[in-house]
Structure formats: C-alpha cells, structure tokens
Image (spheres, grey):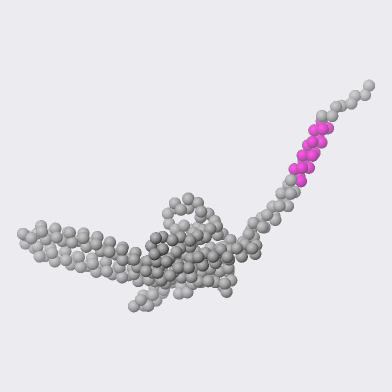
Amino acid sequence: MMNAFRRWCEKILRIPPEPEAPPGDEATARIFRAAPAYFRLLMIMWVISNLFIFLFFIASIGTGLVAAIVTARHQRGAEVVAAVFGLVLFFIVALLVFQAVFRLAVMRLEYEKRWYVVTDRSLRVREGVVIVREMTVSFANIQDVAVTQGPIERLLGLSNVRVTTAGGGGHTQNKQAGPNLHQAWFRGIDNAEEVKNLILERLRALKDSGLGHREETVATATSAPAGTAFRDALSAVLDEARALRQSACRPVRQDS
C-alpha cells in the first residue's frame, strides 16, 4: 500500500525519484541521506501531536455528550440525543484516524525523498513532498559551516549541519518570517562531522585553485592600474599647482 501511495505522489506531485547533482563535477558528487533515527524522531513528534489532538477532541465531544444526556434524561428524546452525539463522535474519531494515517504516510515519504548532494563546487538540499524546498549553494558564497544538536537529537545520535551563505549571518535575516534563504540545513544525519569536513575541504580546494575568488581577483586587477594612473594624475596636478604658486609669489624686478 505504501508503494502505491509513493507512486501516486510521485506522479501527481511530480516528485523526482532520484536526486540531481548541483553544478560541479558529477564524478565528485556525494549523496547523503537522513539517518533512520531521524524517522524515529519524526515518529515521536507524530505520536505526541496525535495524542494531543485525540484527547482534545474526545474530551470536547465527550463533555458535550454527557451534558446533553444529563439535561435530557428526564425528557423524551434523550436516547435520540445520545445516538446523534455518538454518531458525531464516531465520525470525528474516524476522521482523526484517517488524517493521522495520511500524515504518517506523507511523513514517511518526506523522509525518503529528503537528500543532500555535495560536489566539488556546490551543494544542493532538497526536502518536502507537498511543499518542495530545494536550495543550491555555491561554495564561493559560503561564509560558515556549523554543527547543531538538540537534547533529543543527542539521545538519538543525530546532528544537523548548517551552511550559512553571504548575507545570512545577521539578526535581521533571522527575524524574517518563513525559511531563511541564506541557510541550508543537512537535517537528521548521523555523520555531521564527515559532512562538515567534506564541505570545508572542498571549499579550501576551490579557494586554493583561485576559482572561488575569481571576481575579487578580476576586480583587483582591473582597479589597480586605474588607481595608479589616478594617483599619478593627482601628483602632476599638485606639482603644477606648486609651480604656479611659486611663480605668483616671486617678486617682480623693476629696472631703473
């Protein structure tokens, strides 16, 4: 049944079955997946959220049902009221069960379709099924690579790798609503140090080759001669101004 649901989602939502490598040499591409413990973490969150939803709705409907029965127990039609409330409760429970199973199937599919690809020049992160979020980051724009880990993730042996690009280190970006477009996350992996070291190693190799600072090199090479010529022109103007000043201050000789 899960395979049929997966094929249906891939067809309807047009989900690519395999990851595509970002710009760079495909021979250097490394594909990383979320660890199995990450799905267990999602399951824990799924159980907690569904327990809260079930308890809330059952308590609300049950309280109304008891109140209606107590109010109408000395009146005709108490059995009808109880039957109606019982039917409503049944449909609500069935709806809650359906949404819980559907969310579980989507969550499993999101876990399977979450992947991270690193080449020699860039990386790509893709997550989501209903709402697909895909981000490609060039190594030339990376400013920081950090490993984060919460208490529950620490218990499960999971970590996250946060890659921050240019413009993503300020507090203004963090206060904006929605996902931060200057941060790419490798979530729920059990080899965070390996991923971090790989990114840093390839970032250093790119910078050593000079490709990572190509724009800066071109700008410096272009602006350096222009700056030297400008300084020479200013020196010439200054020398002429000094000569004119000396000529103006020289006393005029009068012949007798």
Judging depth in this view, the residue of 218 and 56 nearest the camera is: 56
Figure disc tally: 0
Confirm whether the magenta stretch covers residue 240: yes
Measured as percent of width and height from the top left, residue 27 is found at 57, 74
User: From the viewer's perspective, is 129 left or right of 215?
Assistant: left
Q: Position of residue 183 (x, y in %)?
A: 49, 59
Residue drawn at (11%, 65%) of the image = 80
The quadrant in which residue 93 appears is bottom left
- For image coordinates 48% across by 63% down, the residue present is 161
- Left or right: residue 227 versus residue 69 is right
Q: Which segment is the magenta one?
A: 232-248
**Residue at the limit of the structure toward the right, as seen here:** 256
Left/right of residue 120 with respect to residue 38 in the rendered view:
right
**Where's residue 225, x and y in %?**
73, 52
- What is the x, y in percent for residue 233? 76, 45
Q: Nearer the viewer, residue 88 or 166?
A: 166
Q: Quadrant of the N terminus?
A: bottom left
Looking at the image, can residue 134 be seen?
Answer: no
**Is residue 209 positioned above or below 231 on the image?**
below
Examine the residues drawn in magenta and state their main secondary structure.
helix
The one of 14 and 89 positioned closer to us in this rendering: 89
Residue at figure coordinates x 94%, y 21% from the top left? 256
Residue 205 in sight here? yes
Residue under the point 24% across and 69% down: 94
